[in-house]
């Protein structure tokens, strides 16, 4: 069992209202945490497309509670008439969106990055109707979030594979240029749109891998650079955040100042991605970090457990490296287990934990713990034969559990005085400050949890022989103590 201990007060020191790090000092309040929000998992249902609901629509009650991690907010809705966009624009839809945005704001996020499938027809003169419902949804979130103090930005995806366009659609050079101009014209003057340092921002997903139809990967950065320059020369100054895949990192030397590179790889080993992000920070004055709580994709056979070390070490590294922005992945990707939204399996554990880390990031130091609490992630299943495994990049140490998936619990504790935790009969001391680690469960299928914070729980683990090729196959149940 590995336990990491951190004495918080020695992490950083305030210098008046400004924090001093390597590079340009950043004033308190000038850091932002951006939350990636998948537009096809709305708080009231599953949307894939503009006019058509995904199979099952908002009828989340059709899903078995133990087989699918679904948002708590969606349980309140049973059926609606009309299209997903119709409901989003209705009073009931607006109420559902606002309720979720309040949770996002209270968790310390500043910007909602709406992950939208690109529109297949950016030349339409009127931004309305099925082809542009994504931008209508972006506007809806932006206007509702503005009243709460949130900003909204486009997280531009690479393909439309919705129910309305089942054969898929990708942009070429000319279409991306037309789309960017249309988006700028529509939202350039919107007060709710995110404009870091006064520049209209777009976050471009897969900029070096998959965004450009018919363009070689080693030419893609040159395209985005030229596009930003053209728009700026036209009086449309743009700050473009480009998602760079690690294997394309070597192509980024001489990055133009108006392009902000960042690595969006929620399935990457934590040690690897933090090291790459530190290297990447030398290429940009607007250092941007990305963080994820874990990852699971049966399609890619990649599994990273919900080890709280990922969250803690990523925030700690971002603060140390003078990052201006953290891009969190994600609020609601329930298919890849990068979700932090209140849900059936996770409750509000991650939302409450991130409120502490987001506040710390914006203060430029890990803040002292002001109340004792603990979170425990327990596996829902124990699987004998598993294809998915934790990746290992180069010399980086692979995370995870090898072939013993489902045999560890993961914990995080922030204590103002010493305490303890007992999981499956194993006792773990909880020192003052922050501690985290994993606890072996052995062959147990019934796990009893007790803490010095009060309360007990008994958790059942389901034994399975083979891995199920669906998103919920390696889910965890989160328990909260001291809240």
Image: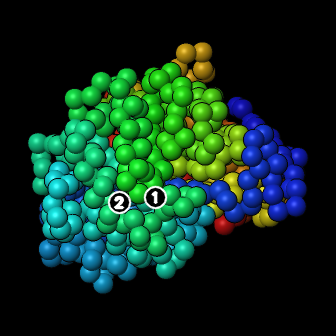
Query: Of helix, strand and loop, which one carries label 1?
Result: strand
Q: Is residue 289 above or below residue 76?
A: above
Q: Is residue 36 visible?
A: no
Labelled disc at residue 452: none
Question: Is 208 displayed left or right of 213 in the figure?
Answer: right
Q: Is residue 209 visible?
A: yes
Residue lying at the far top in this picture: please name it.
395
Of residues 423 and 357, the one nearer the viewer is 357
The quarter in which the C terminus is drawn is bottom right
Cα gap from disc 2 to disc 1, whole angstroms: 8 Å
Labelled disc at residue 184: 2
Sequence-first tag of 2 and 1? 2
Residue lying at the far bottom in this picture: please name it.
91
The quarter in which the N terminus is drawn is top right
Q: Residues within 10 Å of mark 2 (few under 14, many from 20)?
A: some
Of residues 100 and 223, the one nearer the viewer is 223
Q: Position of residue 20 (x, y in %)?
A: 82, 48
Q: Quarter-wise, where is residue 425 in the image?
A: top right
Query: Of helix, strand and loop, which one carries label 2?
Result: helix
Residues at badges 2 and 1 in contact (C-beta under 8 Å)? yes
Query: Residue under circle 1?
Result: 200
Write the residue at 12% across / 55% down.
Answer: 164
Q: Residues within 10 Å of mark 1 (few under 14, many from 20)?
A: many
Q: Position of residue 440 (x, y in %)?
A: 62, 34
Q: Position of residue 147 (x, y in %)?
A: 49, 80
């Amino acid at each position: 069992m590995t336990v990491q201990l951190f004495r918080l007060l020695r992490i950083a020191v305030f210098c008046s209202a400004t924090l001093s790090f390597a590079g340009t000092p950043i004033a308190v309040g000038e850091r932002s945490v951006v939350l990636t929000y998948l537009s096809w998992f709305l708080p009231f249902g599953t949307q894939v497309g503009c006019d058509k609901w995904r199979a099952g629509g908002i009828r989340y009650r059709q899903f078995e509670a133990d087989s699918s991690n679904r948002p708590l907010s969606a349980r309140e809705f049973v059926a609606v008439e009309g299209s997903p966009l119709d409901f989003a624009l209705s009073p009931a839809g607006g109420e559902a969106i606002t309720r979720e945005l309040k949770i996002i704001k209270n968790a310390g996020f500043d910007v909602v990055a709406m992950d939208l499938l690109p529109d297949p027809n950016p030349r339409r003169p009127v931004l309305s109707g099925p082809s542009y419902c994504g931008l209508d949804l972006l506007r809806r979130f932006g206007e509702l979030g503005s009243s709460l103090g949130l900003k909204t930005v486009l997280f531009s995806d690479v393909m439309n594979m919705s129910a309305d366009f089942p054969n898929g659609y990708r942009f070429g050079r000319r279409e991306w240029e037309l789309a960017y101009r249309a988006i700028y014209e529509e939202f350039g003057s919107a007060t709710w749109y995110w404009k870091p340092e006064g520049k209209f921002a777009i976050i471009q997903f897969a900029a070096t891998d998959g965004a450009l139809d018919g363009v070689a990967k080693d030419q893609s950065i040159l395209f985005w650079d030229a596009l930003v320059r053209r728009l700026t020369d036209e009086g449309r100054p743009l700050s473009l955040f480009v998602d760079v895949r690690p294997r394309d990192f070597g192509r980024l030397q001489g990055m133009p100042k108006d392009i902000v590179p960042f690595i969006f790889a929620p399935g990457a080993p934590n040690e690897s991605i933090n090291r790459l992000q530190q290297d990447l920070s030398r290429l940009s004055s607007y250092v941007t970090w990305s963080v994820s709580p874990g990852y699971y994709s049966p399609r890619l056979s990649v599994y990273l457990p919900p080890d709280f070390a990922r969250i803690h070490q990523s925030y700690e590294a971002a603060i140390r490296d003078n990052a201006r922005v953290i891009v969190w992945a994600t609020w609601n990707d329930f298919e890849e287990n990068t979700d932090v939204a209140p849900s059936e399996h996770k409750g509000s554990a991650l939302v409450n934990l991130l409120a502490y880390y987001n506040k710390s990031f914006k203060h430029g130091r890990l803040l002292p713990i002001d109340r004792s609490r603990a979170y425990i992630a327990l596996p829902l299943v124990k699987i004998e034969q598993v294809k998915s495994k934790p990746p290992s990049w180069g010399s980086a140490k692979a995370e995870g559990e090898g072939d013993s998936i489902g045999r560890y619990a993961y914990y995080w504790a922030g204590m103002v005085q010493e305490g303890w935790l007992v999981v499956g009969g194993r006792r773990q001391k909880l020192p003052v400050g922050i501690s985290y680690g994993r606890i072996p469960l052995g062959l147990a299928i019934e796990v009893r949890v007790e803490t010095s914070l009060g309360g007990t729980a008994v958790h059942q683990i389901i034994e399975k022989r083979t891995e199920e090729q669906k998103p919920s196959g390696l889910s965890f149940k989160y328990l909260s103590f001291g809240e």
